[in-house]
Amino acid sequence: MKIAMIGHKRIPSREGGVEIVVEELSTRLVEKGHEVHVYNRKGNNVQDRNADKDKKKLTEYKGVKIKTVPTLSQKGLEALVYSFFATIMAIFKKYDVIHYHAEGPAAMLWLTHLFRIKTVVTIHGLDWKRAKWGKIAKKYIKFGEKMAVKYADRIIVLSKSVQNYFKEEYGRETEFIPNGIEKPEFAKAEIIKEKYNLDKDEYFLYLGRIVPEKGVHYLLDAFKKVKTDKKLVISGGASHTNDYLELIKEKAKKDDRVIMTGFIQGKELEEMFSNCYAYCLPSDIEGMPISLLEAMSYGKTCIVSDIPENIEIAGEYAIPFKMGNSQDLKKKIEKIINDKKSLFNENEIQQYILGICDWNNVVRKTENLYTEILKEKKK
């Protein structure tokens, strides 16, 4: 099959969960003999330009054909302009399937529908709920959701709660296909020892975008009240949320145990996951958080907000706290510091998450969806 992917920022990249999913899915589909074209978004702001430096001349990655699409740097217009031009470019390439990722880009499905092109949409989360978007942007994202409901041949969701939402809100059936994860290589604390003076089990870790809905402010408020020599590492960058990033930096300055690393990847990332005492995910909103899957793949005990998306993934192998409640989060952090027996068995955590989140299953199920809708086309 000839397949296009639209909706992410760029691959290869760890800028967000969507990018990781697109990379894993597209490269594995190529390995299975399909032709995959991925429409990367050209970066315009400083952070994006830095991410683009090594990719400016990239036209192929692990067999995946890379198409770079220009856009605007203005918040709220960047994704809209990108997805419009990406769709226009894709319409004339005679793809068997165009696979959209996220609700905003799905707003362009009216165009693919006009040309009778088969489409799949993956809903990575209910993006209109995210605090970083204003009223107009939220309405546009909700419009994308409605276009997906109306025109997509198949909709993939990453959690049962979102699946229930589409059924109750629109009466639309969706396909539940969770994200995947691979068994990682454990790494000794070398880079992180040199850069941040961190060693095994000396720190709690948050890794993800520094945006309001991730709840990093709850974590900082909770941690400052915890009496411990352990440190708190906050890793990640902003995403159209520089004001919030500055707020987090100000909070972090008030506690010398807090280390903000910015965006990390590669061996440094492996070392950070391998050696943390526990992982924290205090988010208000999630789709299916890749960082949580990764932390669990390293066998780490995770303290997570009790939203359905987190609990659904972690099951009994995480310690939940009441969403938005810093006091309850503080108690859970203290619990695993004061009682090491409250930490889960690393091997059990790892076996559990690798058992339910397998990239091979993700690719096989997605490939089956493509095949189904193409058979429908022939009829």
Image (tube, rainbow, N blue to C red):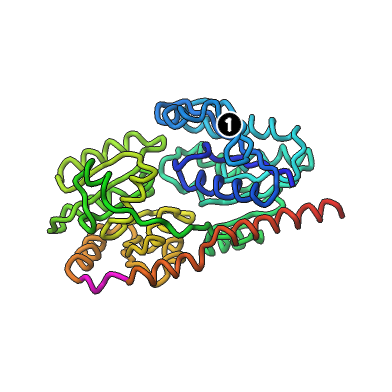
Residue 343 colored in magenta in the image: yes
Amino acid carrying label 1: it is: Tyr
Front residue of 236/1: it is 1
Q: Is residue 171 visible?
A: no
Q: Residue furthest right?
A: 379
Q: Residues within 10 Å of mark 1 (few under 14, many from 20)?
A: many
Q: Which residues are magenta?
A: 340-344
The count of marks equals: 1
Front residue of 47/157: it is 47
Front residue of 5/155: it is 5
Q: Quadrant of residue 371?
A: bottom right
Relative placement, left or right, of 267 versus 138 is left
Q: Is residue 73 visible?
A: yes
Front residue of 243/336: it is 336
Dominant SS in magenta: helix
Q: Residue at x 15, y 43 (%)?
A: 254
